[in-house]
Amino acid sequence: MLMQLSIMTRIRFQSAALLFLVTLFLNPAYENNCTIAAESTTPSPPGNSTVPTKKDGATKSSPVVVEVNGVKLTQNEVDTQINKTMELAKGKIPQDRVEGVKLDLRKKIIEDFITRTLLSQEIERLKIAVNESEIAQAVKEVEKELPQGMTLETALQQSGTNLGQLREEITFSLRANKLFDSQIKTDSPPTDEEVKNYYTTNQEQFGNPETVHARHILIKTNEQDDEKTKGEKKAKAETVRKQLVEGADFAKLAQEKSDCPSGKKGGDLGTFKRGMMVKPFEDAAFSQKVNEIGPLVTTPFGYHLIQVLEHTQATNKPLEEVKTEIQEALTNQKKQQMATNYLAELRKKAKIIDVTDEVSKK
């Protein structure tokens, strides 16, 4: 149920359904880095396109997990969402983290159900509506955000949903945005001092980050390798390094020797910024001189030979150039806090029975 999360984080988000697709398909990652990228976060559950309005959600075969003003979420519904999310993330979560991820998803699903139910009831009470043109425009915005060459139909198929469900999510999101707009009013614009402080403490937002364009050759190691095997692989990596230092073609050797899929492209990893690769690899890549063959770098994935092709330093835009952008960000921060307070008030007035919590108290 991603839609209400997007509303909470971006009050003026014109098509919160974008987050639904972006989370599932557009999560930035390098195809070629043979898992040297920094560890990703726990996936969020996919959107639940059903706006809760009925009071008879429980069945005899499925116990109630939580009840909000008479609207019930059952264990079957929770399990269905968890299973769908885990299927979409299949092969991307280490086996030893699967149970922990499921527990996190369960908590998110319950919290999102409570939030969505409270918002839905207020939307209905205040008779907030959206028209077809608004929905159609939001669908177009979703299509604009898709990767080049991907159609909306393909994206929806990959997410396990359909256009009808997406339109329902968009409708709910737009109505929720209107609800917040009607209930939340900022009292005053940000001051010049607030703008300056924000600019000073968030420099990384206002310009281009430091980046490196690099290629590498990986001699992969495995957890089951004994010391002898590791030694042999390290010796192999040192031999390859010697060849490179003596003038061998890097791309050709990468194609022949590298255990990384990037070897097919001559070891090219593209351009990346800090925080995207594991620490030892990042430290080496950002400290090496351009074009030199660096020393052997050891990571949990093996032995790397890195060549930096380009190193671009960070640049910052002047305050005056981004002042309007900062004012907007600060205004949204205030709105987000006010939205949090508004939801807290709805929650305080609601009758919420958390069965899990009730059981834990016994």
Image: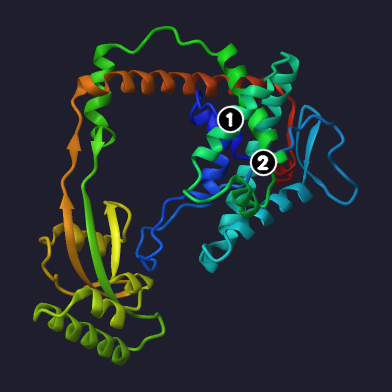
Seen at 60% across and 43% down, the residue is 108
Q: Residue furthest right?
A: 60
The residue wearing badge 1 is 138
Q: Secondary structure at mark 2?
A: helix
* Residue 334, x across and y down, in percent: 43, 19
Q: Crowdedness of circle 2 by 10 Å Cα count: few (<14), some, many (20+)? A: some
Q: Is residue 261 above or below residue 193?
A: below
Which badge, 1 or 2, comes first in the chain's sequence?
2
* Residue 204, x across and y down, in percent: 26, 37
Q: Quadrant of residue 32?
A: bottom left
> Can the viewer see residue 357?
no
The residue wearing badge 2 is 110
> Can the viewer see residue 153?
yes
Identity of the amino acid at label 1? Ala
**The N terminus sits in image quarter:** top right
Q: Quadrant of residue 351?
A: top right
